[in-house]
Image (spheres, rainbow, N blue to C red):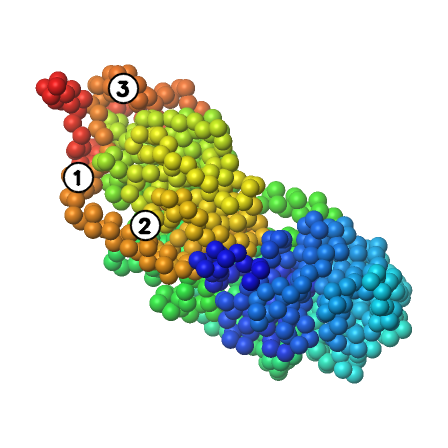
């Protein structure tokens, strides 16, 4: 195939897409022959489930904005956005591009096939303003013209003699008589006539559809103010009806029915013959619904009087099965069975993120009983829509707790972190209704969003950080928030729990405010230490355990990498700097391999730099992307440490051999930058999330999976064959009296700055617990300020108990070590 790179097709295949980016009816199409639904990704409605093996990839990697099926269902035409976009024609059976047309300059808003399958019409966006009629079999443009208004919809007449465009104060009929007679190589002017709008001339027309059957000489359109209008064959506005809604978005029709997608989840049905009202379809789920509580179809019928519902922004009727597909502006998809309009039933539905997906986390492979019915096949994603969602890689038959979810086959649960339901809606879906972008920009600024998530290795706690610097911890067994802390002054960019092999249970938070907080997860997430060496945003922080030592590594926009070692002092566990390395490029992300010996860092110059964690020295460097532009944004190592995956700002994903640096596979498909990646625990999939609100599940080639599993077995055998001197403790211990002496002699460990020299920290703002009102003393208030330094160096009995749980170290003191060195020449 000329569309897919060879290395991509052999090693990795796109198996599933969890997301939808349709902004209107121009981005939703239904095959009139087979019932195949296309919405920037393809669904097979005959199977009631998303089609997981039919995707088309553009070689130019531009975002698809419009699409339409051919009347025979063999081809799909797409339009793109960006500079010099193309109209592409795809063969669905071969999944390859047939031909393309490049006559637009700044983006395409609508495309349509003529019913006689001879022409394709494409309409440019408000910056392009071109209308082209393309005889695709001859690969020539036969007619062209310009429009003076923004166009949001296009529809062909049943006899293919004309088509109609709708937009801002715009209804125009375009006639193709001159196109049929044109045999020249240059296009002729496209003849257009405006509709006679009368008193509705100042309306914004959201969508348009030409009649079918006995009403083939009529044209129907809707206005954003909520009017359904009918034009006759003389272009005159003949009649209209009020939809009784605040906003109307989309329109679709059959020979006898008209379906109008409106605000607040409303879909109205009218007769095409006389515009008489027929019925209103059931509404979707209310915003903020508990998806685990909707286990039956009857739960959707219980409409809440004060409930808030998403707008229906796109509707498409399937004449084969007589189903109606509806897309809502919370990025949810519903398919309704309307064979009996008075007894409408839900066929299938799917719920997706409504905004940029910032991060994801795989549920750990926990031995024994799983938490809340979750297993290693579950992963979590966080988004700018202020939700954390649980998904399953494969069908959740084994997840008995969530098997009765009636809203989605892939979605297990949604955690809402904000009571504001407006964050669950995509403001871009309503941007087409107006040319004013200021409101959307303000909405984007107000939205906070969850920036990063991290699961505790035992799978019991989920930590998340948002763009306001608030740290939250949820108990996954009850799905309740047990901690909410204003930990940082800026957004939290990275979270990491210490691994079980460290013998400690710590949580590190890194932020744009240049601080790293280390919290004790066993002591109500009290503050252990704050690290402030970085002079700019901290992009990554990771724990590592190797050579009986616990390390914490961090990198940031200041181009520096700090390696710190854990020490046990009379004040508890402290991390002290052992190495500091500065590069010439910005460091965006970091991952630690399975052995805990090496750290891979993704850099702005598209290189992966491998560092030895023990020595802090760079071991090797190799290219992390095949492209010659952009920067590496994310780095992820598979569970075995054999392969490293990278994402570049050029929107591509690459997989490299960690040891040889050889590129194994390159993939693309996201329309925005890839913000996160994870290998599954079984080494079968790579999951990626992006700013386009979509989650991609990539199936790895069997040879890659076999290689990773083989290395995992080898690592397990090495661990079993090599007895560890101390299976729990990896920390160094220093006698408190000799800490400063050792730091000066080795010039490696630097004393933590005194509290007076540190920048002011934020306090814990909320502690989720009992809701009872209790009288507290001033002493209790002082104890709440866990960010303050404990002045009393003598540990309390409780502290002694917690410190006694840390076993004695395996490393001798400096004095004994010096004696051995003197005795051994």
Residue 640's tag is: 2
Q: Marks 3 and 2: which is nearer the front?
A: 2
Position of the C terminus, as image quadrant, is top left
Q: Residue at x 71, y 47 (%)?
A: 437
Q: Disc 3 designates what residue?
A: 746
Residue 507 is at least partly visible in this image = no
Q: Marks 2 and 1: which is nearer the front?
A: 2
Compute the Cα span from label 3 to label 2. 35 Å
Residues at circles 3 and 2 in contact by the CB criterion of under 8 Å: no
Closer to the camera, 627 or 146? Answer: 627
Q: Position of residue 531 (x, y in %)?
A: 38, 29
Answer with mark 3 or mark 1, whichever residue precedes in sequence.
Answer: 1
Q: Quadrant of residue 592?
A: top left
**For the residue carrying disc 1, how many other residues have a C-alpha within 10 Å: few (<14), some (14-19), or many (20+)?**
some
Q: Quadrant of residue 301?
A: bottom right
- Say whether residue 748 is left or right of residue 202: left
Answer with mark 3 or mark 2, whichever residue precedes in sequence.
Answer: 2
Q: Residue at x 39, y 42 (%)?
A: 591
Residues at circles 3 and 1 in contact by the CB criterion of under 8 Å: no
**For the residue carrying disc 2, how many other residues have a C-alpha within 10 Å: few (<14), some (14-19), or many (20+)?**
many
Q: Position of residue 179 (x, y in %)?
A: 84, 68
Q: Quadrant of residue 525?
A: top left
Q: Disc 1 designates what residue?
A: 726
């Amino acid at each position: 195939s000329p569309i897919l790179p060879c290395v991509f097709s052999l090693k990795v295949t796109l198996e599933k897409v969890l997301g939808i980016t349709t902004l209107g009816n121009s981005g939703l199409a239904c095959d009139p022959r087979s019932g195949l639904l296309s919405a920037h990704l393809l669904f097979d409605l005959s199977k009631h489930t998303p089609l997981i093996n039919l995707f088309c990839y553009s070689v130019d990697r531009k975002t698809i904005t419009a699409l339409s099926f051919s009347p025979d269902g063999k081809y799909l035409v797409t339009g793109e956005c960006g500079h010099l976009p193309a109209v592409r024609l795809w063969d669905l059976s071969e999944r390859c591009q047939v031909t393309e047309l490049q006559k637009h300059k700044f983006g395409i808003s609508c495309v349509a096939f003529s019913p006689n399958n001879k022409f394709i019409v494409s309409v440019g966006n408000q910056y392009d303003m071109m209308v082209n009629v393309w005889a695709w079999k001859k690969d020539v443009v036969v007619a062209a013209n310009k429009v003076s208004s923004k166009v949001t919809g296009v529809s062909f007449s049943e006899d293919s003699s004309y088509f109609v465009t709708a937009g801002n104060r715009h209804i125009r009929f375009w006639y193709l008589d001159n196109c049929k007679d044109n045999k020249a190589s240059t296009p002729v002017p496209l003849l257009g006539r405006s509709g006679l709008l009368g008193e509705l001339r100042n309306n914004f027309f959201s969508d348009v559809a030409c009649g079918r059957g006995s009403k083939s000489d009529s044209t129907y359109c809707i206005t954003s103010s909520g009017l359904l209008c009918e034009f006759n064959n003389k272009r005159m506005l003949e009649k209209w009806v009020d939809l009784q809604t605040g906003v109307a978005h989309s329109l679709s029709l059959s020979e006898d029915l008209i379906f109008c997608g409106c605000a607040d989840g409303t879909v109205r049905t009218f007769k095409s013959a006389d515009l008489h009202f027929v019925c209103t379809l059931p509404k979707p789920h209310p915003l903020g619904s508990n998806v685990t509580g909707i286990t039956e179809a009857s739960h959707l019928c219980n409409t809440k009087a004060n409930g808030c519902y998403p707008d229906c922004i796109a509707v498409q009727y399937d004449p084969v099965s007589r189903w109606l597909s509806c897309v809502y502006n919370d990025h949810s998809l519903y398919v309704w069975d309307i064979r009996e309009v008075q007894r409408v039933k839900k066929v299938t539905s799917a719920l997706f993120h409504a905004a940029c997906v910032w991060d994801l986390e795989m549920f750990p492979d926990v031995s024994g009983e799983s938490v809340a019915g979750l297993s290693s096949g579950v992963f979590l994603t966080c988004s700018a829509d202020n939700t954390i969602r649980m998904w399953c890689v494969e069908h959740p038959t084994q997840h008995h707790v969530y098997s009765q979810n009636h809203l989605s086959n892939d979605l297990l649960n949604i955690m809402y972190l904000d009571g504001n339901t407006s964050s669950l809606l995509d403001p871009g879906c309503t941007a087409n209704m107006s040319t004013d972008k200021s409101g959307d920009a303000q909405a984007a600024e107000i939205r906070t969003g969850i920036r990063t998530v991290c699961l505790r290795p035992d799978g019991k706690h989920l930590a998340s950080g948002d763009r306001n610097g608030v740290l939250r911890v949820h108990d996954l067994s009850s799905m309740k928030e047990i901690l909410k802390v204003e930990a940082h002054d800026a957004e939290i960019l990275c979270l990491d729990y210490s691994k079980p092999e460290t013998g400690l249970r710590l949580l590190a938070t890194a932020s744009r405010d240049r601080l790293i907080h280390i919290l004790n997860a066993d002591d109500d997430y009290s503050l252990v230490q704050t690290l402030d060496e970085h002079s700019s945003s901290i992009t990554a922080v990771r724990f590592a355990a190797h050579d009986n030592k616990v390390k914490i590594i961090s990198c940031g926009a200041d181009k520096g990498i700090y390696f710190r070692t854990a020490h046990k002092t009379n004040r508890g566990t402290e991390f002290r700097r052992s190495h500091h390395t500065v590069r010439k490029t910005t460091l965006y992300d970091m991952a630690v391999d399975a052995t805990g010996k090496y750290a891979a860092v993704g850099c702005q110059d598209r290189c992966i730099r491998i560092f030895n964690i023990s020595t802090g020295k760079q071991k090797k460097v190799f290219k992390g992307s095949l492209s010659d532009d952009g920067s590496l944004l994310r780095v992820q190592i598979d569970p075995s440490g054999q392969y490293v995956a990278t994402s570049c700002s050029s929107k591509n994903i690459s997989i490299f051999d960690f040891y040889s640096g050889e590129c194994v596979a390159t993939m693309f498909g996201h329309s925005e930058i890839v913000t996160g990646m994870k290998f599954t625990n079984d080494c079968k999939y790579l999951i990626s999330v992006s700013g386009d609100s979509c989650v991609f599940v990539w199936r790895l080639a069997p040879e890659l999976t076999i290689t990773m599993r083989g290395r995992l077995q080898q690592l397990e055998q090495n661990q079993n064959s090599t007895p560890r001197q101390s299976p729990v403790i990896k920390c160094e211990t220093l006698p408190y009296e000799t800490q400063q002496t050792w730091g000066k002699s080795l010039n490696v460990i630097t004393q933590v700055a005194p509290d007076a020299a540190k920048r002011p920290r934020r306090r814990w703002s909320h502690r989720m617990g009992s809701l009872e009102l209790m009288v507290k003393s001033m002493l209790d208030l002082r104890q709440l300020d866990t960010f303050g330094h404990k002045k009393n160096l003598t540990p309390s009995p409780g502290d002694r108990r917690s410190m006694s749980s840390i076993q004695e170290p395996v490393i001798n003191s400096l004095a004994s070590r010096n004696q051995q060195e003197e005795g051994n020449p």
